[in-house]
Image: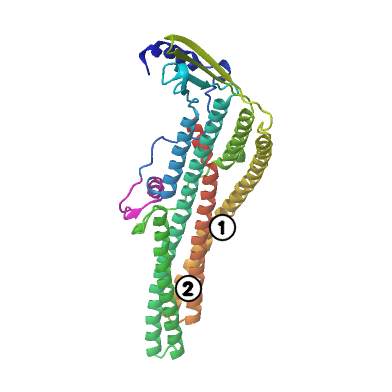
Amino acid sequence: MHPMFAPAMAAALVAISATPAAAQVDNSAVAGPTVPSGPLEVRTGPLPAVLTLAQALEEADARSPALAAARADVEAARGRLRQARFRFNPVLNVEVENFAGTGPYTGFNGTETTVSVNQRLDIGGRRKARMTLGEAELAAQEYRFAIARANLGQQVRNLFALGVAARDNLALARENEARAREVSRVARALVEAGKEPPLRGLRADAALAQATAALRAAEAEEEAARRSLAALFGTDIPPAELVGSDLLPPPPIVSASQTLDVRLAEAERAIADAQLRQARAEGRLDPSVGVGVRQLRETGDRALVASLSVPLPLFDRNQGNVAAARSDIQAAEARRNSVLTNTQAAIANARAALDAADARVAALAGSAINQAREALRLAELSYRAGKSSLIELLDAQQAYSETQAELIAARRARAEAQATLERQAAAVGDMEAAQ
């Protein structure tokens, strides 16, 4: 730019950069759960050889690819909000007139040069609408991250419960196999002593074969459970052993309206509201003003020029997008009501399942398992003494194994019901901590 234009252009830029009162923005944000900024560093390397439930939850937070993807989505929403805060760029115009003509306008003798800056004014509130929408979308993305984390925790708890059940079933299968092997040995001894017919020995051998097959199946199921748990962490090398219990502390009582799913539905309703405001803003008029300097080469004089341009809304006033945004609000409200109803049902069902599982565990872990164990002990003593038949002993063994298996299944059902309630209650602690 020629030095003679600098003072006038500086004044023009200062005048245009002043923000109209209507364009001032309310920076109050729609708040979602607190999510640390910056990319998530995903932990790599082998898992601990011995894994507890608390360690599994911590490893999942640090390793899960799904959680890393959800964190990246939050960062993308923050970037879009940052972009929404920028104002319209000014436009620099340079016009050269009256050159390369004829007569007095030959060459550049009569040239007129105009340098101006034009600025679109945000009188219609486009920037505020963009920022409001960006804040609502960021809040929704933060809720999605919290939901992904809560879902991951529920998956870890469920798979850990599956692993613990598989571990206990494997221990039971080993116990059954060892007991069947001992019964087979005793039966052969009784057959050789003439106290049992050969058919009883074959029956004991068949029971041993069944117990061995069940043991191999339990071993495969236990390894598959550990591999499924490791897959949540993004690794194919499972921990060598799961230790501890899958029993969680009593889950807190949570209102369905405070759950993450309902909060996300409300955030999506806020997005629909912001989209309506943005659609209305897009239909308003935003004039552009300009100021510049013109130089007349023939006389060497300079003069200021000013311009104003206003679009004429003869045809397009964004009516279609406004109508669509209104319908989107109705759809978002309906989805929120549906999510609330489904969440209330899920919480009630989980509490009923937890109560039933608690009662089942209490019954089985108390008198039922003790009676089955005592009956088996007496049957073994009686069989070794030749006072009862092999069939009676096998029946006692089966009754004890079935009671143990039912207890393991009841504990797993209780852990899964607790995991569901923990998933629904994830909002309580997160929201209180965020506030």
Q: In this view, does 359 lie above or below 31?
A: below
Mark 1 → mark 2, Cα distance in angstroms: 21 Å
Q: Are marks 1 and 2 in contact (CB under 8 Å)?
A: no
The three-letter code of the residue at mark 2 reads: Gln
137 is higher (above) or lower (below) than 382: above
Provide residue 101's location: percent of width, then percent of height: 47, 22
Neighbours of disc 2 within 10 Å: few (<14), some (14-19), many (20+): many
As drawn, the label of residue 397 is 2
| Residue highlighted by disc 1 | 360
Q: What residue is drawn where x is 45% and y is 10%? A: 302
**Residue type (three-letter) at the residue carrying disc 1:** Arg
The quarter of the rendered structure image containing the N terminus is top left
Point out the residue furthest to the front here: 103
Work out whether mark 1 precedes mark 2 in sequence or the reverse, and give the earlier one.
1
User: Please, is residue 343 above or below residue 383 in the view?
Assistant: above
Nearest the eye: 70 or 196: 70
